[in-house]
Image (tube, grey):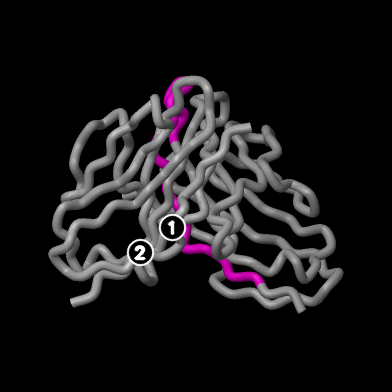
Amino acid sequence: AQRVTQPEKLLSVFKGAPVELKCNYSYSGSPELFWYVQYSRQRLQLLLRHISRESIKGFTADLNKGETSFHLKKPFAQEEDSAMYYCALSLGAAGNKLTFGGGTRVLVKP
Amino acid sequence: DVKVTQSSRYLVKRTGEKVFLECVQDMDHENMFWYRQDPGLGLRLIYFSYDVKMKEKGDIPEGYSVSREKKERFSLILESASTNQTSMYLCASSLWAGGLQDEQFFGPGTRLTVL
């Protein structure tokens, strides 16, 4: 079965510092990868998806099939980036279900 | 603007009670999902549905059942609540995108406590 691993439960960085959230997956085929974010007292929402190849709120993520990774990066963290981040994988099967990682809480200190 | 609503934000029930969690979406989405969210475990899929009256087991269906009688409504049922079902429950919906995963839109969540 497919699995998504986010090895860091908590990342604490200072404002203006780079931040990288790690995501590794186990699946031998061609998955679709996503990052979802949940800000304090808000709903979980899509941040970005690898097929879009776009930068959202300064974040980028590159799918590395060789390393089975989809790390999320931002060169200069802002306080408003403090949130819970989830990496998710889809096999594109009927029903379009997602498998989520355990989540990484990011705290950006002033 | 996609709206996914859940019937309760907070719910307290006793062990053995039958519990109904309701979810409604207003964007004519084919797919609907129920997850539970626990610290360190992320989101785990309980059940999902890709059409009216259709349902598929997710990763942790034991102790739960679902009902989808109308396209906009997806209900999660705990037949006999137990303390280990204390959790945050999230509902989500998405369009059918022909085999590709479309964005899932989430509800605000229901925090269920089973005493």
Relative side of A34 to A54, left or right: right
- Number of other residues with Cα within 10 Å of mark 1, as a class: few under 14, some 14 to 19, many 20 or more: some
Which chain is indicated by disc 1? Answer: A
- Number of other residues with Cα within 10 Å of mark 2, as a class: few under 14, some 14 to 19, many 20 or more: some
**Residue range of the region highlighted in magenta in the rendering:** B95-112
Q: What amino acid type is highlighted by mark number 1? A: Glu
Residue marked by disc 2: A11
- Residue drawn at point x = 58 percent, y = 62 percent: B38
Q: Quadrant of residue A16?
A: bottom left
- Residue drawn at point x = 82 percent, y = 69 percent: B17
* Main secondary structure type of the part rendered in magenta: loop
Q: Specify the label residue A8 is tagged with.
A: 1
Vertical placement of A94 versus B93: above or below?
above
Expressed as whole percent of the image width and height from the top left, the position of residue B85 reads 72, 64
Give the Cα distance between marks 1 and 2. 7 Å
Expressed as whole percent of the image width and height from the top left, the position of residue B69 reads 67, 41
Front residue (pair A15, B31): A15
Q: What amino acid type is highlighted by mark number 2? A: Leu
Front residue (pair A107, A89): A107
